């Protein structure tokens, strides 16, 4: 009986081995009815796993980067030089007719210093500056005049919208938002105008610039 049991066990093991060999061999054929295994993920797209990464995000048009550095600007000529204001580092600077402008892509910082016998008020800006800008700025709209606090003290703020100048290369016109701050001290007025696309999120950069204004 012991010999018979050993013989039966050996036959059973032989059958299992045969079946296992047949199953493993069937996967090696690529003919009709066969199953082809899926290649590993690292072998797709030339073997570069980064091809499956999410696309890199970019700043929306007109957004000033969060890591933008600022440098102090102090005029050295013109009718009045007694102030300092921080402007974005690396922006292109130009001067024309007593106006200093810093630009980068779709954003602009514009600084004008003029003599003034009295301090600007909400009423004076509403009655004088708004009509002037309405005649100068294409499709001027949504003016709002108020008094706000900055580190230099109380200032008159005018916000409005208007079309930018046509791009000389592409001919594109951008709808811009404007913030115009009127600072005043001892017969001198400095107008600081910040502008950029309406949909850009530049609240923090514009606050940094307007808060940095100081009299000397």
Image: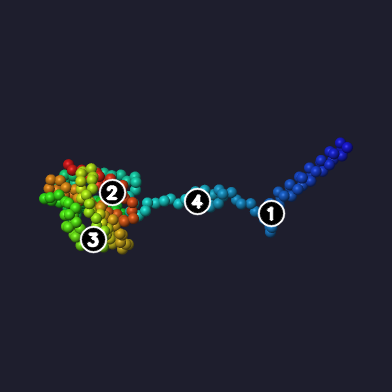
**Residue 202 tag number:** none
C-alpha span from label 2 to label 1: 68 Å
State the residue position of label 4.
51
Res 76 seen here: no
| Residue extending furthest toward the top | 2
- Residue 203 on image: x %, y %: 31, 49
Q: Residue at x 54, y 49 (%)?
A: 47
> Viewer-nearest of labels 4 and 2?
2
**Residue 206 tag number:** 2
Indicate which disc, 4 or 2, sits on the residue closer to the N terminus: 4
Question: Is disc 2 placed on a helix, strand or loop?
Answer: helix
State the residue position of label 1.
29
C-alpha span from label 3 to label 4: 47 Å
> Viewer-nearest of labels 2 and 1?
2
Indicate which disc, 2 or 1, sits on the residue closer to the N terminus: 1
State whether residue 168 is above or below residue 42: below
Q: Residue at x 17, y 42 (%)?
A: 216
- Residue 17 on image: x %, y %: 76, 45
State the residue position of label 3.
137
Going by the image, does 32 lie left or right of 89? right
Nearest the viewer among 96 and 142 is: 142
Marks 4 and 2 close (CB-CB < 8 Å): no
- Residue 116 on image: x %, y %: 13, 51
> Viewer-nearest of labels 1 and 3?
3
C-alpha span from label 3 to label 2: 21 Å
Question: Is disc 4 placed on a helix, strand or loop?
Answer: helix
């Amino acid at each position: 009986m012991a010999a018979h049991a050993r013989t039966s066990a050996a036959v059973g093991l032989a059958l299992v081995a045969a079946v296992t060999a047949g199953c493993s061999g069937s996967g090696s054929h690529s003919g009709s009815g066969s199953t082809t295994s899926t290649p590993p993920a690292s072998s797709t797209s030339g073997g570069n796993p980064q091809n499956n990464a999410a696309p890199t995000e970019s700043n929306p048009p007109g957004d000033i980067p969060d890591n933008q550095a600022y440098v102090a600007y102090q005029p050295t000529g013109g009718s009045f030089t007694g102030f300092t204001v921080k402007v974005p580092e690396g922006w292109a600077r130009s001067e024309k007719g007593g106006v200093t402008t810093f630009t980068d892509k779709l954003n602009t910082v514009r600084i004008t210093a003029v003599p003034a016998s009295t301090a600007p008020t909400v009423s004076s800006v509403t009655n004088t500056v708004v009509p002037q800008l309405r005649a100068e700025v294409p499709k001027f709209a949504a003016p709002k005049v108020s008094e706000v606090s900055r580190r230099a003290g109380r200032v008159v703020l005018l916000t409005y919208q208007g079309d930018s100048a046509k791009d000389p290369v592409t001919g594109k016109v951008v709808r811009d938002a404007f913030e115009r701050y009127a600072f005043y001290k001892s017969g001198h007025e400095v107008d600081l105008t910040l502008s950029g696309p309406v949909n850009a999120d530049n609240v923090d950069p514009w606050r940094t610039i307007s808060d940095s204004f100081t009299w000397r």
